[in-house]
Amino acid sequence: MNRIRVATWVLVAIQMVHSAEEYLKGFDRRFQVFVWYNAHFSSVGQGMFFAFNLSIVVMMALLSLVAFSDWWRERFPFLLAGIELVNGLNHILFSVFTGGYYPGLISGLFFIPVALWLLAGRERSCLKD
């Protein structure tokens, strides 16, 4: 299995852990979009939050399986890396702005080096073409 496939599956695994951390540590009760929605409409609830995160993991895994067709081979892994890099950086910013731990921070930190490693591989593969 090549570096791009390994890194892509590592990002899927980190997302699984990340979703669990967010769920267990109350991300849905701290993230302002959810707080505002819960205050003005009906509560999102942990069950819905869990289902949403589970659907993200399942979607990532399914897309990772088909991402290696001709068209997606050079696109999906790097799109995923970019999304997860932003996800990890956002959790750092949430923690800085709130002055402490923010749900998802610990696992979010793992997105950054894996995403950068994957993106660095993209640069090398472009140089070979």
Image (cartoon, helix red, strand yellow):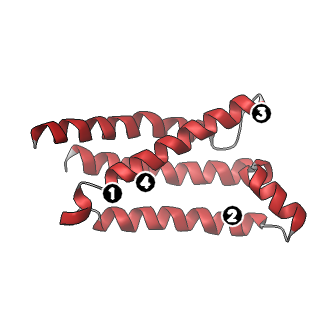
Q: Is residue 1 left or right of residue 96?
A: left
Q: Which residue is mark 4?
A: 12
- Tell me which label, 3 or 2, sits earlier in the chain: 2
| SS type, badge 1 | helix
Residue of label 2: 49
The image quadrant that residue 66 belongs to is: bottom left
Q: Which mark is residue 102?
A: none
Percent x, y for residue 74?
24, 54
Q: Of marks 2 and 1, which one's residue comes earlier in the chain? A: 2
Residue 76: mark: 1
Q: Residues within 10 Å of mark 3 (few under 14, many from 20)?
A: few
Instruction: Residue type at mark 1: give it.
Output: Phe
- The residue labelled by disc 3 is 98
Q: CA distance from mark 2 to mark 1?
A: 25 Å
Residue at (84%, 63%) from the top-left corner? 38
Relative to the observer, which residue lies in front, 120 or 3? Answer: 120
Expressed as whole percent of the image width and height from the top left, the position of residue 111 reads 47, 40
Give the number of the mark in front: 4 or 3.
3
Which mark is first along the chain, 3 or 4? 4
| Residue beneath the point at 42% across and 33% down | 113
Q: Secondary structure at mark 4?
A: helix
Marks 3 and 1, Cα distance to the nearest angstrom? 33 Å
